[in-house]
Image (spheres, coloured by chain):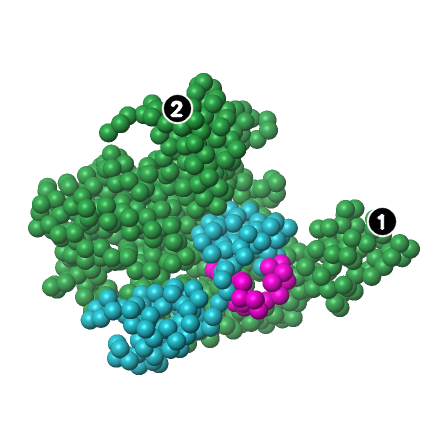
Amino acid sequence: MVTALSEVPQKTLEILEPWRGRKGFLIPVLQAVQHTFGYVPKEAIEVVSREMKMPTAEIYGVVTFYAQFHLNPRGRHIIRVCRGTACHVRGSLKLLDKVKEMLKVEENGTTEDLRYTLEPVACLGACGLAPVMMIDEDTHGRLVPDKLGAIMDQYV
Amino acid sequence: MPTYRSHVLVCGGTGCIAGGSALVQARMKEELAKKGLDKEVLVVQTGCHGMCELGPILVVYPEGTFYTRVQPEDAAEIVEEHLYKGRVVERLLYRPSEKLESVKHYNELPFYAKQNRIALRNCGYINPDNIEEYIARDGYQAMGKVLLEMTPDDVISEIKKSGLRGRGGGGFPTGMKWEFCKKSVSDKKYTICNADEGDPGAFMDRSILEGDPHSVLEGMAIGAYAMGADEGYIYCRAEYPLAIKRLKAAIAQAESYGLLGRNIMGTNFSFELHIKEGAGAFVCGEETALMASIEGERGMPRPRPPFPANKGLWGKPSNINNVETWANVNPIILKGGDWYASMGTEKSKGTKVFALTGKVKNTGLVEVPMGITIREIIFDLGGGIIDDKKFKAAQIGGPSGGCLTEEHLDLPVSYESLTAAGAIMGSGGLVIMDEDTCMVDVAKFFLEFTQAESCGKCVPCREGTKQMLLTLQRITSGKGTMEDLDKLEELAVMVKESSLCGLGQTAPNPVLTTLRYFRDEYEAHIKDKKCPAKACSGLIQYLVSPDLCRKCGLCAKNCPVNCISGDRQTPYVIDQSRCIKCGTCLEVCPFKAIRKE
């Protein structure tokens, strides 16, 4: 995920290559950009705009529409606290407050050491385990605030 | 193919994986190898069994012994006792309650006894990563029948006969939808699978994609043949990484077997399938928004008509169906439309998968015939309410749905009956609420969601949901007036009637049904400034009962805002002006001296 800003144009060109001349490329390209750099850097948007002959305004429109895309760098680990119905009924708000307090960040905020980014999400689809949170690709279920510390310590 | 005397099925659904089932599977293999049983017993990772509450789940066949909450440490005992000596490990069996006998077999569980698994037929039985296992359970046989023996019109008339309706929420008759698309004349058509399961509280599509991906591919190919399409898309939300991984593997396998791609089964029919990952927008579950998103644009709905059947993806005739709908196609073709139509009610045929969650004992996925009552689902399959508290409401259909109350418990479930009660079938999320749930808070919760997910294209939805939410926030913080209630209702009706797409047209449902059935709770928040369920933090107070307080000071020590004062001599007191109502003091007090009012 750590890529120097100077490498962004070159890497973006590589990402674009297989999509030239194909329709519906923008979202998969942005997903690849985000996956490579951890966010969507302004420099990458400029390259996409120039190469694919698409106004930057249109690209920004798409980036800001979807929750998955981010214009700023994010933490090494993404904590997603589920705020779906089943989790809500089983106390996910308390969980979210506890994580905020532990990390001293607000929703969608990133810790100063870039270790964690906290994101509430609408539903993780693991309602049978409510309340649930995901750290990166791992799902942690049946949580109580006291368990949080030990789980989060696993992600350095 | 080697044969095995026993099969050990370890659940690999998201719920069980979170519970550690991958490690259980690895340890089972190790232990079997240690005993030299690895040539006799096969360990298989399957999709979701549906009973997520009891995960990780492990089933031993041919007996069908059902082990629950299996931990990696239990692997040695299961191998030693059950697979080596042939004795069931009693302590890992499911016991419905202390008083009742433990249940040994899969089909004896009340949770499964009332189910009729058609869309979920293979979930939990087969290894989703192995196409051979799908084929062994009649997989791709329906496609063979369709391609070799049936005309596209035959297929459509069979689907029409079955009475299958869209399982994603709309409930539109599937056969008719296919017919519209077939009748559209074009050089190019698309079939699309809507796997953007965004409703909070629903996870049946995830389970099917993860547990039986081929059933969706086969259904889509059959649909494509009937409608004359040669290309398809599965639009899957990015929050389901495992589903995407299994779909990709399934498509690659089907292509290598000649079951997808060019000239399928040696016929003239070709069908190419792609996966599109969503990027996190609830509104993309709406069909026109979904197509805009596939095209790489902002996922905003378009006015209909033109309907997708005439002018859909890239302006070409397209058909969109939901995951569960596609999964029902194979059994209907093989067993016939009449068979499917023999289940259910007059207008709602077949079965429906519900995601049973919330304050119910057995959470998980259940597939039941239409016409079953809510009471049967909650109390027979779900085992009743946690801690035997009082049932208050069932929220059905997610943020687009509504709340049903005790008076609806004996209502037979169908598209029509739910709509008449002010709710909708929706995708089938069923969240159970008990006496501790505040219905005003629930309505506010759903509006927070829909308001945030409104795409902003049409004014009624964008501004209307915002104003409704502000009103609800006033009410739950004790600042509401009785005029607010009238205004809320008026706005809700306006948003419902004038929004462009399904999101806005259904967003007011949670508010309207709670107003209809729980008006007294709204009035208590406004007139008495009280939350009857003690859930709205703006209307509750935490108080120390001086007669119970032993002055230990634990509450003061744990209070995050240091608003509790007192010492060994003076009883502790909470400063209400600084209290953030987090409830920590109530949790830590060993003497129950803190009460919530």
Give, as a single range, the part of the protein colored magenta.
Answer: A98-122
Q: Could you classify mark 2 by the number of other residues whose Cα lies within 10 Å: few (under 14), some (14-19), or many (20 or more)?
A: few
Q: Is residue B441 visible?
A: yes
What residue is shown at x 57% (from left), y 54% (from top)? A152
Q: Could you classify mark 1 by the number of other residues whose Cα lies within 10 Å: few (under 14), some (14-19), or many (20 or more)?
A: some
Colour cyan, chain: A
The picture places residue B471, in percent across and down from the top left corner, at 56, 70
Q: Is residue B4 left or right of residue B16?
A: left
Q: Is residue B82 left or right of residue A91?
A: left
Q: Secondary structure at mark 2?
A: loop
Residue B36 got which mark? 2
What residue is shown at x 61% (from left), y 43% (from top)? B389
The picture places residue B74, in percent across and down from the top left corner, at 51, 31
Q: Colour of chain B?
A: green
Residue situated in front as seen by the camera: B444 or A61: A61
Which chain is home to disc 2? B
Circle nearer the viewer, 1 or 2: 2
Quarter containing the C terminus of chain B: bottom right
Is label 1 in contact with label 2 (beta carbons under 8 Å)? no
